[in-house]
Amino acid sequence: MSDISPQEKARILSEALPHMQQYDEETIVIKYGGHAMGEENLAKQFASDIVLLEQTAINPVVIHGGGPQIATMLGRLGIKSEFAAGLRITDAAAIEIVEMVLAGSINKQIVSYINAAGGKAVGLSGKDGNMVTAVKASRTMVDPDSNIEKVIDLGFVGEPDKVDLTLLNQLIGHDLIPVLAPLASSREGQTYNVNADTFAGAVAGALRAKRLLLLTDVPGVLDKSKKLIPELSIKDAHKLIADGTISGGMIPKVETCIYALEAGVEGVVILDGKTPHAVLLELFTDQGTGTLMHK
Protein backbone atom coordinates (compact mmCIF):
# COMPACT_ATOMS: atom_id res chain seq x y z
CA MET A 1 0.00 0.00 0.00
CA SER A 2 3.02 2.34 0.42
CA ASP A 3 3.18 2.78 -3.37
CA ILE A 4 -0.48 3.84 -3.63
CA SER A 5 -1.32 7.53 -3.62
CA PRO A 6 -3.56 8.95 -0.87
CA GLN A 7 -6.24 9.58 -3.50
CA GLU A 8 -6.20 5.93 -4.61
CA LYS A 9 -6.38 4.75 -1.01
CA ALA A 10 -9.41 6.98 -0.48
CA ARG A 11 -11.04 5.60 -3.64
CA ILE A 12 -10.51 2.00 -2.44
CA LEU A 13 -12.04 2.79 0.95
CA SER A 14 -14.96 4.54 -0.71
CA GLU A 15 -15.60 1.51 -2.92
CA ALA A 16 -15.55 -0.77 0.13
CA LEU A 17 -18.09 1.24 2.15
CA PRO A 18 -21.34 -0.02 0.54
CA HIS A 19 -20.09 -3.59 0.84
CA MET A 20 -19.31 -3.07 4.52
CA GLN A 21 -22.83 -1.75 4.99
CA GLN A 22 -24.25 -4.78 3.18
CA TYR A 23 -22.57 -7.15 5.63
CA ASP A 24 -23.08 -5.02 8.74
CA GLU A 25 -23.73 -7.32 11.74
CA GLU A 26 -24.09 -10.32 9.40
CA THR A 27 -22.38 -13.67 9.98
CA ILE A 28 -19.72 -14.77 7.51
CA VAL A 29 -18.41 -18.35 7.76
CA ILE A 30 -14.92 -18.82 6.29
CA LYS A 31 -13.55 -22.29 5.63
CA TYR A 32 -9.77 -21.88 5.71
CA GLY A 33 -7.68 -24.66 4.26
CA GLY A 34 -5.24 -25.72 1.62
CA HIS A 35 -1.57 -24.90 1.35
CA ALA A 36 -2.14 -21.24 2.27
CA MET A 37 -2.36 -22.43 5.88
CA GLY A 38 1.24 -23.59 5.75
CA GLU A 39 2.69 -20.27 4.54
CA GLU A 40 3.35 -18.04 7.54
CA ASN A 41 3.02 -14.70 5.73
CA LEU A 42 -0.29 -15.68 4.13
CA ALA A 43 -1.55 -17.09 7.44
CA LYS A 44 -0.75 -13.86 9.30
CA GLN A 45 -2.32 -11.82 6.49
CA PHE A 46 -5.46 -13.97 6.69
CA ALA A 47 -5.62 -13.45 10.45
CA SER A 48 -5.33 -9.68 10.03
CA ASP A 49 -8.12 -9.70 7.44
CA ILE A 50 -10.39 -11.66 9.82
CA VAL A 51 -9.77 -9.06 12.54
CA LEU A 52 -10.65 -6.33 10.05
CA LEU A 53 -13.99 -8.05 9.37
CA GLU A 54 -14.76 -8.14 13.09
CA GLN A 55 -13.77 -4.48 13.46
CA THR A 56 -16.23 -3.50 10.71
CA ALA A 57 -19.18 -5.05 12.65
CA ILE A 58 -19.14 -8.32 10.69
CA ASN A 59 -19.31 -11.60 12.63
CA PRO A 60 -16.66 -13.97 11.20
CA VAL A 61 -16.61 -17.67 12.06
CA VAL A 62 -13.46 -19.49 10.92
CA ILE A 63 -13.47 -23.24 10.23
CA HIS A 64 -10.15 -24.79 9.25
CA GLY A 65 -8.88 -27.97 7.70
CA GLY A 66 -5.43 -29.47 8.02
CA GLY A 67 -4.94 -32.31 5.55
CA PRO A 68 -1.28 -31.60 4.68
CA GLN A 69 -0.32 -31.13 8.34
CA ILE A 70 -2.09 -34.36 9.34
CA ALA A 71 -0.32 -36.26 6.56
CA THR A 72 3.05 -34.90 7.73
CA MET A 73 2.47 -35.95 11.34
CA LEU A 74 1.18 -39.39 10.38
CA GLY A 75 4.30 -39.85 8.25
CA ARG A 76 6.59 -38.86 11.12
CA LEU A 77 4.95 -41.43 13.36
CA GLY A 78 4.99 -44.14 10.71
CA ILE A 79 1.20 -44.44 10.53
CA LYS A 80 -0.01 -45.31 7.06
CA SER A 81 -2.93 -43.32 5.73
CA GLU A 82 -5.08 -44.09 2.70
CA PHE A 83 -7.88 -42.26 0.91
CA ALA A 84 -11.12 -43.62 -0.50
CA ALA A 85 -13.96 -41.69 -2.18
CA GLY A 86 -11.99 -38.48 -1.48
CA LEU A 87 -11.88 -39.00 2.30
CA ARG A 88 -9.04 -40.07 4.57
CA ILE A 89 -9.60 -43.53 6.05
CA THR A 90 -9.17 -42.84 9.77
CA ASP A 91 -8.48 -45.80 12.04
CA ALA A 92 -8.13 -45.80 15.84
CA ALA A 93 -4.45 -44.81 15.69
CA ALA A 94 -5.02 -42.07 13.14
CA ILE A 95 -7.98 -40.41 14.86
CA GLU A 96 -5.80 -39.59 17.88
CA ILE A 97 -3.29 -37.84 15.60
CA VAL A 98 -6.02 -36.10 13.63
CA GLU A 99 -7.50 -34.67 16.84
CA MET A 100 -4.08 -33.67 18.15
CA VAL A 101 -3.20 -31.80 14.95
CA LEU A 102 -6.60 -30.25 14.18
CA ALA A 103 -7.77 -29.24 17.67
CA GLY A 104 -4.23 -28.73 18.93
CA SER A 105 -1.41 -27.27 16.87
CA ILE A 106 -3.35 -25.92 13.86
CA ASN A 107 -6.29 -24.51 15.79
CA LYS A 108 -4.14 -22.76 18.37
CA GLN A 109 -1.76 -21.37 15.75
CA ILE A 110 -4.67 -19.68 13.93
CA VAL A 111 -5.99 -18.39 17.26
CA SER A 112 -2.55 -16.99 18.08
CA TYR A 113 -2.24 -15.21 14.74
CA ILE A 114 -5.70 -13.62 15.09
CA ASN A 115 -4.98 -12.53 18.65
CA ALA A 116 -1.60 -11.10 17.62
CA ALA A 117 -3.42 -9.08 14.94
CA GLY A 118 -5.62 -7.50 17.62
CA GLY A 119 -8.58 -9.87 17.66
CA LYS A 120 -10.03 -12.08 20.37
CA ALA A 121 -10.17 -15.58 18.92
CA VAL A 122 -11.55 -18.63 20.73
CA GLY A 123 -10.36 -22.04 19.54
CA LEU A 124 -12.93 -24.85 19.67
CA SER A 125 -13.97 -28.03 17.91
CA GLY A 126 -17.38 -29.40 17.10
CA LYS A 127 -17.13 -31.52 20.25
CA ASP A 128 -17.27 -28.48 22.52
CA GLY A 129 -20.76 -27.89 23.88
CA ASN A 130 -22.03 -30.67 21.57
CA MET A 131 -21.84 -28.03 18.86
CA VAL A 132 -21.78 -30.61 16.05
CA THR A 133 -23.02 -34.16 16.49
CA ALA A 134 -21.88 -36.62 13.84
CA VAL A 135 -22.79 -40.03 12.48
CA LYS A 136 -20.40 -42.48 10.85
CA ALA A 137 -19.85 -41.63 7.18
CA SER A 138 -20.72 -44.23 4.57
CA ARG A 139 -19.37 -44.39 1.02
CA THR A 140 -19.50 -46.89 -1.81
CA MET A 141 -17.05 -47.53 -4.63
CA VAL A 142 -17.06 -49.76 -7.68
CA ASP A 143 -14.36 -52.44 -7.53
CA PRO A 144 -12.33 -52.05 -10.77
CA ASP A 145 -11.68 -55.79 -10.98
CA SER A 146 -15.15 -57.19 -10.31
CA ASN A 147 -17.15 -54.08 -11.31
CA ILE A 148 -19.22 -54.67 -8.18
CA GLU A 149 -20.20 -51.77 -5.95
CA LYS A 150 -19.09 -52.26 -2.35
CA VAL A 151 -19.32 -50.32 0.89
CA ILE A 152 -16.07 -48.78 2.16
CA ASP A 153 -15.29 -48.65 5.86
CA LEU A 154 -13.79 -45.20 6.41
CA GLY A 155 -13.19 -45.82 10.11
CA PHE A 156 -13.71 -42.79 12.33
CA VAL A 157 -14.88 -40.47 9.59
CA GLY A 158 -18.17 -38.75 10.29
CA GLU A 159 -20.80 -36.54 8.72
CA PRO A 160 -22.68 -33.78 10.56
CA ASP A 161 -26.02 -34.95 11.93
CA LYS A 162 -27.04 -32.01 14.12
CA VAL A 163 -25.69 -28.52 14.88
CA ASP A 164 -26.41 -26.97 18.28
CA LEU A 165 -25.83 -23.21 18.20
CA THR A 166 -25.99 -22.65 21.98
CA LEU A 167 -22.24 -22.13 22.40
CA LEU A 168 -21.71 -20.20 19.16
CA ASN A 169 -24.52 -17.82 20.03
CA GLN A 170 -22.64 -16.93 23.24
CA LEU A 171 -19.61 -15.88 21.16
CA ILE A 172 -20.96 -14.33 17.95
CA GLY A 173 -21.60 -10.62 18.26
CA HIS A 174 -19.59 -10.28 21.47
CA ASP A 175 -16.21 -9.23 20.00
CA LEU A 176 -15.09 -12.88 19.95
CA ILE A 177 -14.02 -14.80 16.83
CA PRO A 178 -14.77 -18.56 16.91
CA VAL A 179 -12.11 -20.73 15.26
CA LEU A 180 -13.46 -24.26 14.81
CA ALA A 181 -11.68 -27.55 14.14
CA PRO A 182 -13.82 -30.04 12.15
CA LEU A 183 -14.10 -32.72 14.80
CA ALA A 184 -17.40 -33.96 16.20
CA SER A 185 -18.73 -36.53 18.64
CA SER A 186 -21.40 -39.12 18.05
CA ARG A 187 -24.35 -39.40 20.42
CA GLU A 188 -22.38 -42.18 22.12
CA GLY A 189 -19.30 -39.98 22.57
CA GLN A 190 -17.12 -41.37 19.75
CA THR A 191 -14.82 -38.82 18.11
CA TYR A 192 -15.17 -38.42 14.34
CA ASN A 193 -13.03 -36.64 11.77
CA VAL A 194 -15.32 -34.56 9.54
CA ASN A 195 -14.41 -33.13 6.14
CA ALA A 196 -13.83 -29.41 6.74
CA ASP A 197 -15.95 -28.28 3.76
CA THR A 198 -18.86 -30.43 4.92
CA PHE A 199 -18.45 -29.20 8.50
CA ALA A 200 -18.42 -25.57 7.33
CA GLY A 201 -21.52 -26.10 5.21
CA ALA A 202 -23.43 -27.56 8.15
CA VAL A 203 -22.43 -24.78 10.55
CA ALA A 204 -23.10 -22.02 7.99
CA GLY A 205 -26.50 -23.52 7.22
CA ALA A 206 -27.47 -23.69 10.89
CA LEU A 207 -26.34 -20.07 11.36
CA ARG A 208 -28.14 -19.00 8.15
CA ALA A 209 -24.97 -17.10 7.34
CA LYS A 210 -24.94 -14.23 4.87
CA ARG A 211 -21.95 -15.83 3.14
CA LEU A 212 -19.96 -19.05 3.28
CA LEU A 213 -16.47 -18.65 1.81
CA LEU A 214 -14.63 -21.84 0.86
CA LEU A 215 -10.94 -20.98 0.53
CA THR A 216 -9.26 -23.59 -1.66
CA ASP A 217 -6.18 -24.03 -3.86
CA VAL A 218 -7.96 -23.11 -7.12
CA PRO A 219 -9.51 -19.82 -8.37
CA GLY A 220 -13.04 -21.25 -8.22
CA VAL A 221 -15.23 -23.31 -10.54
CA LEU A 222 -13.74 -23.45 -14.06
CA ASP A 223 -15.45 -24.05 -17.38
CA LYS A 224 -14.21 -26.58 -19.96
CA SER A 225 -11.69 -24.04 -21.30
CA LYS A 226 -10.36 -23.58 -17.73
CA LYS A 227 -11.74 -20.07 -17.36
CA LEU A 228 -13.30 -18.95 -14.10
CA ILE A 229 -17.09 -19.07 -13.88
CA PRO A 230 -17.91 -15.99 -11.76
CA GLU A 231 -21.48 -16.95 -10.86
CA LEU A 232 -23.57 -20.14 -10.67
CA SER A 233 -27.10 -21.05 -9.67
CA ILE A 234 -27.91 -24.44 -8.14
CA LYS A 235 -29.55 -25.44 -11.42
CA ASP A 236 -26.41 -24.45 -13.38
CA ALA A 237 -24.21 -26.42 -10.99
CA HIS A 238 -26.24 -29.61 -11.44
CA LYS A 239 -25.93 -29.26 -15.23
CA LEU A 240 -22.14 -28.77 -15.05
CA ILE A 241 -21.75 -31.84 -12.84
CA ALA A 242 -23.89 -33.90 -15.24
CA ASP A 243 -21.87 -32.90 -18.33
CA GLY A 244 -18.51 -33.40 -16.60
CA THR A 245 -17.42 -29.75 -16.49
CA ILE A 246 -17.38 -29.97 -12.69
CA SER A 247 -15.44 -33.12 -11.83
CA GLY A 248 -13.09 -34.73 -9.33
CA GLY A 249 -12.55 -32.96 -6.02
CA MET A 250 -14.64 -29.97 -7.10
CA ILE A 251 -17.84 -32.07 -7.02
CA PRO A 252 -17.99 -32.46 -3.21
CA LYS A 253 -17.17 -28.75 -2.79
CA VAL A 254 -20.04 -27.75 -5.07
CA GLU A 255 -22.34 -30.25 -3.34
CA THR A 256 -21.43 -28.58 -0.02
CA CYS A 257 -22.35 -25.22 -1.57
CA ILE A 258 -25.73 -26.57 -2.67
CA TYR A 259 -26.40 -28.07 0.77
CA ALA A 260 -25.54 -24.77 2.49
CA LEU A 261 -27.74 -22.73 0.14
CA GLU A 262 -30.68 -25.06 0.64
CA ALA A 263 -30.13 -24.84 4.41
CA GLY A 264 -30.48 -21.06 4.36
CA VAL A 265 -27.10 -19.52 3.49
CA GLU A 266 -27.61 -16.55 1.15
CA GLY A 267 -24.51 -17.08 -0.98
CA VAL A 268 -21.48 -19.38 -1.13
CA VAL A 269 -18.17 -18.51 -2.76
CA ILE A 270 -15.38 -20.88 -3.82
CA LEU A 271 -12.14 -18.87 -4.08
CA ASP A 272 -8.37 -19.20 -4.03
CA GLY A 273 -7.00 -18.91 -0.50
CA LYS A 274 -3.48 -18.30 -1.85
CA THR A 275 -4.56 -14.94 -3.31
CA PRO A 276 -3.43 -12.16 -0.93
CA HIS A 277 -6.42 -10.68 0.92
CA ALA A 278 -8.81 -13.06 -0.88
CA VAL A 279 -11.53 -12.60 1.77
CA LEU A 280 -11.41 -8.80 1.55
CA LEU A 281 -11.37 -8.85 -2.25
CA GLU A 282 -14.49 -11.00 -2.29
CA LEU A 283 -16.49 -9.12 0.31
CA PHE A 284 -15.40 -5.50 -0.17
CA THR A 285 -14.83 -4.98 -3.90
CA ASP A 286 -17.26 -4.61 -6.81
CA GLN A 287 -15.75 -7.41 -8.89
CA GLY A 288 -15.17 -9.91 -6.07
CA THR A 289 -13.12 -13.05 -6.69
CA GLY A 290 -13.88 -16.72 -7.13
CA THR A 291 -17.22 -18.32 -8.03
CA LEU A 292 -20.39 -17.12 -6.28
CA MET A 293 -23.14 -19.72 -5.98
CA HIS A 294 -26.71 -18.77 -5.15
CA LYS A 295 -30.20 -20.24 -5.32
Image: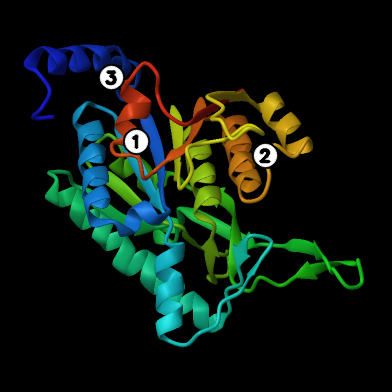
Q: Quadrant of the N terminus?
A: top left
Q: Earlier in the sequence, mark 3 or mark 2?
A: 3
Q: Quadrant of the C terminus?
A: top right
| Image location of residue 78, percent across then percent down | 47, 88
Amino acid type indicated by mark 3: Met
Kindly state the secondary structure of the residue where label 3 is placed. helix
The answer to whether residue 33 is above or below residue 220 is below
Farthest residue to the bottom: give it.
78
Q: Earlier in the sequence, mark 2 or mark 1?
A: 2
* Nearer the observer, 77 or 290: 290
| Image location of residue 186, percent across then percent down | 57, 65
Q: Please indicate whether residue 38 sits to the left or right of residue 192 in the image.
A: left
Is residue 115 among the parts visible in the rendering?
Answer: yes
Q: Earlier in the sequence, mark 3 or mark 1?
A: 3
Marks 1 and 2: in contact by CB < 8 Å?
no
Residue 246: mark = 2
- Disc 3 versus disc 2: nearer the observer: 2
- Disc 3 versus disc 1: nearer the observer: 1
Amino acid type indicated by mark 2: Ile
| Image location of residue 110, percent across then percent down | 27, 55
At label 1, counting other C-alpha atoms closer than 10 Å, the crowd grade (few under 14, some 14-19, many 20 or more) is: many
Residue marked by disc 1: 278
Residue marked by disc 3: 20
Q: Which residue is depicted at the point 22% across and 51% down?
A: 41
| Image location of residue 90, percent across then percent down | 57, 74
Amino acid type indicated by mark 1: Ala
Is residue 26 among the parts visible in the rendering?
Answer: no
CA separation in Å, label 2 and label 1: 22 Å
Marks 2 and 3: in contact by CB < 8 Å?
no
The answer to whether residue 98 is above or below residue 242 is below
